[in-house]
Image (cartoon, helix red, strand yellow):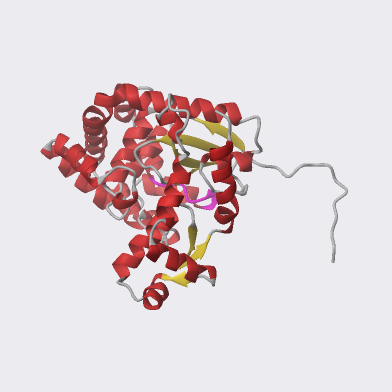
Amino acid sequence: MEVFSMGSRKRETYQLEVKHSLLWEAALGIAAITNERLLDTLDYTENQWQVIKQSLSAEMLVHLETVQEQNTWKTILLLLHEKDLDSLQEFNDFVNELGEEELRYIAIPYLGKNHQEDRRLASQGDREAAARLQEVSRDHAFFPRYISYISQRDLHQLKKHIQEVMSGWYESVIKPDQAKFKGMLERDALSKKKRLEKLEAEDFVEWATHGIRYIPEPSVYKVILIPHFIYRPWNVEADIEGAKIFYYPVANESIHPHDPNVPDQMLVQKFKALGDENRLRMLKILMGGGRTLKEMTEEIGMGKTTVYHHLKLLKSARLIVAYGPRYHVSPRAWEMLPKELEIFLGEEK
């Protein structure tokens, strides 16, 4: 049965906001270096990560072990969304001012309106409420363990850890190249803001994130986009009350503003992913339908670790997507690839 509408009201969508800060860059760097499963897919080379580690103090390396075990980079990002902060000193002062209940409430992730009371109770030390939040988030990669840690950790020790890991990273990694980081983030945010009025909200998010089509959700009124360099080429998604956040990779032209021939970073990423016989074989198989890692391993006759590595690279290039345990070809990526190449090679400089 066909349905048509006689109404003139447009479908409601979300508001857009583009923000940038060296503090977010620092927090995402801490997240990146402690995510060992993704390190080999990031733009930074193994040698660059080793140089960073060598620049850090022994105490800072211990803090990073805690970050890796407890995912406390999440706490830092959530704190940064509570208040616009311009400097490391402002961040540390803000953390010092927070009371125990307030800090825990901010750090415990937003899981939806229906769970806000348990979030409040858990921040007050209610272990049953924390357990309910853990159960609600049981399918998340780290939320249950993280919620347990945040709801039970000694406040003084938690503040000390957050401030020292943030200060250690900022002083060792951000400050030596502060002008470079600040310049590329500012350029990228400015270029995105210039396009805000020219694209519909959903088209803008897809363009900025190189392929994420975010459809409006109930109770999400705003989408915040924040550029980053350290976590390229990945987008990092997060939720806070009333808003969806995308930390997206800065464009190549923001990194190399004086090179008119620099290609889009994601275009390079896609062709790098395609430049391997085994990955092309996997794509051919996935064209015939979705596969789990186990099914792909059996079908292609390679080790599980190797297959997983190739799938990660294809996914980072947005050529495939994962729905639950199954990998699928991304139709929009293939539709757009010839056009993206045509635009780059044919556009006037």
Query: Where are the magenta residues, as a range?
Result: 108-114
**Residue 283 appears left or right of 126:** right
| Image vertical order of residue 123 relative to residue 131, above or below | above
Q: Is residue 134 visible?
A: no
Q: Nearer the viewer, residue 131 or 221?
A: 221
Residue in view at x 50 percent, y 36 percent? 225
Q: Quadrant of the C terminus?
A: top right
**Residue 300 appears left or right of 57:** right
Magenta span includes 74? no
Q: x and y percent of residue 170 in the render?
A: 26, 30
- The outermost residue toward the left is 58
Residue in view at x 23 percent, y 40 percent? 48
Q: Nearer the viewer, residue 158 or 302?
A: 302
Residue in view at x 38 percent, y 22 percent? 86
- The outermost residue toward the right is 6
Q: Is residue 57 visible?
A: yes
**Magenta residues, dominant SS class:** loop
Asked which quadrant contains residue 4, the reply is: bottom right
Q: Nearer the viewer, residue 93 or 274?
A: 274
